[in-house]
Amino acid sequence: MSSLGPTFGRGAMTNSWTDIRNTDLVLVMGGNAAEAHPCGFKWVTEAKAERGAKLMVVDPRFTRSAAVADHYAPIRPGTDVAFLSGVVNYLLSNDKIHKEYVRHYTNAAYLVKEGYAFNEGFFSGYDESKATYDRSSWEYEIGADGYAVRDMTLEHPRSVFQLMKKHFAVYTPEMVSRVSGTPQDRFLKVCDWIASTANGERAMTIMYALGWTQHSHGAQNIRSAAMIQLLCGNIGVPGGGVNALRGHSNVQGITDVGTLTAAIPGYLNLPAENEPTLESHLGKRTFKPLQANQTSYWQNYRKFYVSFLKSFYGTKATPENNFGYDWLPKLDVAYDCLRMFDLINQGKTNVLICQGFNPLMAIADSNKSAAGLAKLKLLVSIDPIETDTARFWENHGEFNNVDPAKIQTEVFMLPVTSFAEESGSLTNSSRCISWKWQAADPYHDSRTDVVILADLFNRIRKAYETQGGKGAEPLLAVDWSYKNPAEPSADELLKELNGKALVDLKDAGGKVTRQAGSQLASFGEMRDDGSTDGAMWIYTGVYGPAGNLSQRRDNADPSGLGVYGNWGFSWPANRRIQYNRASADPEGKPWSERKKYMFWNGERWTGPDVPDYVPTIPPSQATGPFIMNPEGVSRLWVRGLMADGPFPVHYEPFESPVTNPVFPKLKGNPAARIFQRDRPSFGDAKEFPIVATTYRLVEHFHYWTKGVHMNAVVQPEFFVEMSEQLAAEKGIKHGGWVRVWSKRGSVKGKAVVTKRLKPLTIDGRTVHTVGLPLNFGFIGVARKANPINGLTPPVGDANSQTPEYKAFLVNVEPIVGPVA
Amino acid sequence: MFPAIPNPTTDKSNARFGEKDMIRRSASTITPPAKRQTEVAKLIDVSKCIGCKACQTACLEWNQLTEEVGVNVGVYDNPHDLTANSWTLMRYTEYENPESGNLEWLIRKDGCMHCEDPGCLKACPSPGAIVQYSNGIVDFVKENCIGCGYCIKGCPFNIPRISRADHKAYKCTLCSDRVAVGQGPACQKACPTQAIVFGTKDEMKAWAAKRIADLKSRGFAKAGLYDPPGVQGTHVMYVLHHADKPQLYAGLAENPRISPIVEAWKGVGKYAGLALIGLTAAAGVIHHLLQGPNRVTSEDEENAEKLAGGKS
C-alpha cells in the first residue's frame, strides 16, 4: 500500500477480482495466488480457459500456482527488484513500451531539478548517522508559472524518462541472472511475454501478496512492478493492474479504517508531533495541482478531515476549537509491531491488548516476542480461538520451553464471536464492501468485538468521569451517541463511516441539495466548515440516502466484462477499475476495440463502470487520469514520497548469502527500519550459508486453522522443503527429521525433499534455499511445532515497517527424530 | 465457465433415481429397467487443478467422515492413501518432462471411477452390497456388506477400503444422495477453479474436448480424455495433459480392466465353487450320519480350564 499510493494515488488493488478474467497475461510473483487465494484464482484459470491467457509464475519454489502455469522462472528470495528492474531495462532498451500512454499518463516527461544524483546505490541526500534520506533533491523542477516543467519529447537529460533509462541500464539479463539466479532464457521469456502487452491491444495483470511486501525493501518490489505496468500501459484498463491480494476476507477493510498507527480512517494521517495546529497539518496535505487543469483530489483533504473530526467528536467539534484537532494524539514515531515489542522489551509498555492477533506467532524474532510477553503486567487476548500468544506462559516441551513459575504476566482471554456469528460488512481485495448477515448463534458466552470494546470504553470513560485523571478530556469529548451505548450496531457504524449532512446543505444558488440529517450520497458533498460528518470519506456512498448498498446482491453483468456494478459497493464511489479514464487515449477514444472500457462520447465519459474522473471534463482539457495526484499522471518517479528512493534499487536482504553484485557498497536497504539493539542478532553467510523463506499453505489459514480438525487432517505437520541436491549434500532423508537454525532460533521438522526447489547459481556460486511453511505452532490439533518466526530477522521495510519474513539465512542438519 | 448447478429447492422433492433404476446388483439376478436414465459423469481436469484439497474436505464434511490427524512423510499427500474415511485424495507427482525440459507438478484427485463395468460389483459375493444405477453411479450398500474385501481385488483402480471399526467396505458414492436431488457431488461444488465439473456424460465429453483443444494449443500434443474402454468407460473421467502416459499421474492405470481372476470367478469359477460348497455340505451331512455328533470329554474340559488360567 505504501508504494501503490505514491505511484497511482490510492493504495489498493487497482482492478477487481472479477476483472482478472479479462486479462491476456498473468504474472504471479511475490505471491502464490493458487495457494493463498484459491477462490480468487478461479479468474486466472477462467482467463486461461476462455481467453487463451497465459500465466507466468516467478517464485523461489515451483508452487501450486506454478503447477497450472505456462511458464515458470525460479528466483532467489529477496531479489525481485533486480529481476523486475531487468524487465524495465528490457522494455526501455528494446523500445517495447506503450509510448503514448507513457508520455501522457505518467510523469516520464517531468524534469527533476538540478542536484539529484545516484552513486553506487545511494541517492543524493543520505545521512548515514540517521540512516535516512533528506529527500529534497528528489523533487521536480518548478517553472515560473508554478507548475512542474515537462519535456514532452522525453529527451531532456533530466526528464524522468531519460533518468530511468540511465538508472536501469545496469540491470542487463546477465546481471539479473547473476543476482537472482534465474536462467537467462527463462528471464527473457518473461520479458518477451510482458512486452507483448505494451500496445493497448493486450493487457497483463500482476498478482502479488506478501512475497513482495515482507522484505526490508518490500515497497520497492511493488514499485518496480507498478513501473512495468505503466510502461506497458496496463493501468486503468480491463485485465490490467497491479493487484494486491489481501490475506484475510477483510484486511482491505482493516487498512481502510486506519488501524495503522500513523493513520486515521480513509488514508488520512494522524497528526505528527510537529503539526500542533489543524492548519499546520492540513496545509502540508492540501496539494495544489502541478499542472494546469488537474483534479488533484487531495485538495479536498480538509473536507474529509473536518468531517472525520465532526464524526469523532460530534457537537463538541467546533470551528473555535479546530473541530477537536487538539484532542487527537500527536505522533512522534510510527508504533508498528516491531517497535511495540521493542518497547515492551525495554519495559516501556506493560499492558498489551491483542484483538484478533497472535503476535507470538506473527512477529519476526519470536524469542524476542516471548521475552517481551513475560515482561508485561497484563495481556488481554480478544479472540474467537485460543492463541499461542495467550498461552505463551505454558510449557509445551521443546516447542515452548518456558517456566510458568517465572512468568508473572496476568492473562485474560475474552472469547469473541467469529465472523459467522455477527452481522456487519467485509471489504475484500477488490475494495468491494459486502454486508454479511449473522448465520449462527454465538458460541457459549462469547460477545462481539464491538460489545467488548464498547464495554471497555464505557468503563474507562466512567472511571475518568468519576475519578478524573491525566488527559481525560479527549476521552470525554468522544461522541458516543449510539442508540444503545453498550452495543453500537453494525448498521449504525457503517452509517457513521458514510457520513451525513448536519445542516441543510445548499448549492451556490441557495437551493437545498441535502437535508439536515440525511446520509451523504458521495464524498463530493463533504464540507470543511463542520456542516457534514463522516468517519471515513472513501466509504461515502455505501450507506447514502438509498440505504445500505453493501447489501446489494445483483450479479447482472450487462457488459460481460465482470463489472458487477450493483453487487455491494466498491470504494471509491463504486468504481470497479481504478484510474479507468486511462483505458482511453488522450482524445477519449479507447486504445483498442479489444480493450474498450470507459470513453468520451462527445458529451461525457461513459462505459460499463463509474468513471474515475469528473464525467463532464472533455478530453481537450488534458486533465490527467490519475486524479489523486497533483500531476494528474502516475509516477514512474515518486519524488520524495518514499523513504528509500524515487526509483527502486536492488538491495540485498539484511541476511544475504552474497555481497550485492550490483552495488557492492550497499548492505541492505540503507533506509530500512532496524533497531541498533537488534544488530547483533543478524547472522552471516559463513555460519548460515542457506537462504530461507517462509510461506502459507493452502490447507491452513494463517495460525487459526491448526486448531481445526479437518485442516489438520489435510496438512498435519510442519515441514521443511529443500532440493534433492541440498538433501544429498547434508545426508538428509526424504521424510526424515531435520533441524533448521538461524542466529536467533531453531526449529525442527520433517524434510520434504523436492524437485520443486533447485539450487541456483548466484554470482558464480551455488546457493540453496529452504522453504518453511508458517502455519504451525504449539496450540491446536495439528502436530506441535516451534513458531517459525523464531528464525526470522527483526528488520522492517523502510516505508511500511513490514518485517523481512521472506529472505534470511539459516543452516540445516539431519537429526534423530523424537521417539513417537 | 461451466454453468453453475442451481441450488435445490427447500421443498421436499422425490429422489430422481432409486431401486427401480438399478441395472446391476452384486451376487443377484435382477431385471434392469426398460429405459436407462441419462448417464452422468464427473470430469476432473488435472490441468486446472491447483491441489487445494477443498474436494477432500468437502467430501469429509458432506459425508460426515472423521479422518485421523496423521504425520508428514515428506510429501503433500495427506492422508497418505485412501482410507475407509477418506474417499478421495489428492496425489502429487513431480515430473521432469524430458521433451520440454520443464518441471511439471501433476496433481490428480484419486477416488472411485464409477466404471461402466464395475469390477468391485462383479467380485462382490454378498447380495446387494454393491449396486449400479442406470445413470452410471456405482454405490456400496453398507447394510449388505460382509467386509470380505473382494471388492478391492476386483477394482482395477485399487479404491475401496475396509473400515477397521465396522469391517465394511467404503468408497466414493459420487454423492448419490446429492445427485438424487439434482445436485453435483460435494467435491465439485467445493472446487474453486472448476477443475471438477459435473453433468451428463455427453456434456462432460464435450466440455473435455474444449479443454483438450486449449491444452494442445499450449504445447501438450498428447492431451486427451481418460475414459478407459477396458471397463467400458467410467463415470469419473480425467482431462490429462499426457493422456498417452496416464501412469505419470501417481500410477493411474494405463489400461484398466477387471482382473481375469475375478472374471473367471464370476464365470466358470462361480459355478465350480458353488458345486464345491454343495459337495462339502453333503460330505458333512454324511459324516454326521456315519459318526454321530462330537462329544466333549471331561479331559477336554480340564485342559480348557488350564488354558484359561482358571479365569473362566
Image (cartoon, rainbow, N blue to C red):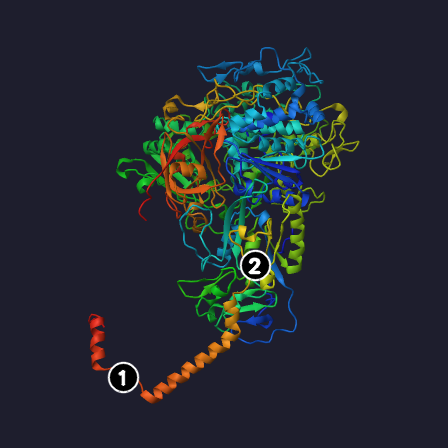
The label number, if any, that marks residue B13 in the structure image: none
Rate crowding at label 2 as few (under 14), some (14 to 19) or many (20 or more) other CA atoms within 10 Å. Answer: few
Q: Percent from the top left, x then y, of residue A723?
A: 45, 38
**Of circles 1 and 2, which is in front?**
2
Q: What residue lies at 57% left-to-right and 71% top-to-bottom? A: B24
Disc 1 designates what residue? B295
Q: Percent from the top left, x then y, of residue A327?
A: 48, 25
Host chain of mark 2: B
Seen in the picture, residue A415 relative to A147 is either above or below; the reply is: below
The residues tagged by marks 1 and 2 sit, at their Cα atoms, a distance apart of: 56 Å
Question: What type is the residue that disc 2 sits on?
Answer: Asn
Q: Percent from the top left, x then y, of residue A237?
A: 68, 34
Secondary structure under tag 2 reads loop
Q: Percent from the top left, x then y, of residue A128?
A: 46, 15
Disc 2 designates what residue? B255
Q: What residue lies at 64% left-to-right and 31% top-to-bottom? A: A192
Asked where in the image residue A578 lies, by quadrant, the reply is: top right
Q: Which one is nearer the viewer's eye here, A126 or B101?
A: B101
Question: What type is the residue that disc 1 sits on?
Answer: Arg
Q: Tell me if I can see residue A5 in this picture.
A: no
Please give left or right for residue B237 compared with residue B167 in the image. right
